[in-house]
Image (spheres, rainbow, N blue to C red):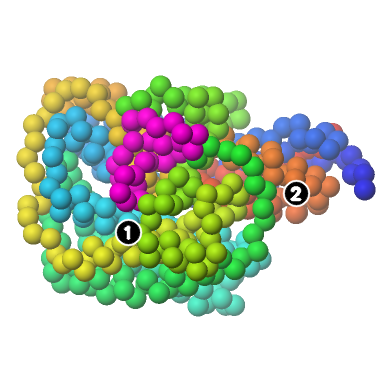
Amino acid sequence: MTTKARKINLKVPFVTRLEGEGALELTTKGNDIDKLHLKIFEPPRLFESFLQGKSYKDVPDLSARICGICPMAYQLTSIQAMETLFGVQLPEHIIRLRRLMNLGEWLQSHALHIHFLAAPDIYGFDSALQMAGEYPEFLQRGMLIQEAGNSLMTLLGGRSVHPVGLQVGGFTKLPNAEKWLHCLTLVEHALPAAKQLVKWSSELELPDYSHDFLCVSLKGEKAFPINSGDIQISNGLVITPAQYPEHFKEHQTRHSTAFYSLLDGHDYLVGPLARMNNSFHLLHEDVKQVAKEYGLKFPNQNMHTSIQARALECFSALHESLGILQQGLPEGEANVAYDIKAGECHFCTEAPRGLIYHYYDLDDEGKVLKCSIIPPTSQNQARIEKDLHFSVKQFGLDKSDKELKYFCERIIRNYDPCISCSTHFLDFKRIQK
């Protein structure tokens, strides 16, 4: 059947269930897309500028304000960059506790996204609140998993949002036995729920608009990478964080106040699906067995399976957290001494939404001369637009405006963009000539 060309002006002023605000404009000419813009109109937040002149001690807490969902990732990336410059050698128990805290943040973010932002698409509701009457147990499961994540963040950071327990050299203090056991109980209770979440995700009827794209994540050696390591790209390239600026270049477009990032001229994906595609083999055997039991297969090039990747990361995070907590409360100092040094430093970690890059140039008093912070969402922006270009045409430009709007929003939510970090979303505008 031949699709009749029509003139369409479709506008979605605000895309809901994203963290932040933005807009999408789609212009079609006949059966082709003439223009598709992810319009980011939020003013620049200027974090890199106001960090200049600040002491290295102030950077972690200030950079954490970039995001209310993954503040710890910003804190820890800045801290570990400076520890690299200062030559800090951390004892094993501090490394283990930081990983435990990372796992807690992944749980917070993934549980929120799956149950409260993505699930309404699947069940046909506008919001999680509308779902609550019909699917209360589903949302209760999300809160159970998120509570476990909150407890881990509070245990090591002093509070679940914008934690204050991290510092260069370790932590301000170590947790006590009572709180440790409380977390152990919550994680034990949440683990079966996470396995049910994996099963639920495996039973979803997901669209499949697979196409080629590059996946970028940290490279692990013996464990699923979270908070250290080189950077691996699915084309085989492996680089150090210090080589990041040689390969990743940012640019700005007229329709967005946020930077777009390209890898050697190409768009790329960061986040749970990129991590699963690059490092599935490094998951614990128990986690891989659960994936096999429910038929989840990685790597794959279907962005709609990102919800399955997040669900499996929830189970993996709880499984690993339980193992760490069962080892018992660690003994030792909360932090180690170090000497301040001037110079440049780079570091990358895996925030829930994907790779974060930090760069700092410090003077001999530890004050910031210049810095660069590149969050996951700005790295995914070019990929989102490329995905929309491909998938919308596959979906069909003959669909109604309502169907196209819903489809585009769902594609965008697959990336779990935090527009507050780099953008805000959207007004959907479609013009057909």
Asked whether, in this view, residue 358 is left or right of residue 112, the answer is: left
Asked whether, in this view, residue 65 is left or right of residue 428, the answer is: left
Instruction: Say which amino acid is labelled 2.
Output: Phe
48 relative to 186, above or below: above
Secondary structure type for disc 1: helix
**Occupied quadrant, residue 345:** top left
Total number of numbered discs in the rendering: 2
The crowd level at tag 1 (other Cα within 10 Å; few <14, some 14-19, many 20+) is many
Residue drawn at 67 percent across, 53 percent down: 208
Residue 312 seen in render = yes
State the predominant SS element of the stretch in magenta.
loop
Percent from the top left, x then y, of residue 117?
53, 59
Label 2 vs 1, first from the N-terminus: 1
Residue 116 seen in render = no
Residue 268 painted magenta: no
Spatial CA span between label 2 and label 1? 37 Å
Residue drawn at 29 percent across, 30 percent down: 346
Secondary structure type for disc 2: helix
**Occupied quadrant, residue 217:** top left
Q: Mark on residue 408?
A: none
Asked whether, in this view, residue 67 is left or right of residue 215, the answer is: left
Residue 238 painted magenta: yes
**Occupied quadrant, residue 160:** bottom left
The crowd level at tag 2 (other Cα within 10 Å; few <14, some 14-19, many 20+) is some
Q: Quadrant of the C terminus?
A: top right
Disc 2: which residue: 395
Name the foreground residue: 51 vs 143: 143
Asked whether, in this view, residue 377 is left or right of residue 412, the answer is: left
Disc 1: which residue: 104
Percent from the top left, x then y, of residue 171?
16, 50
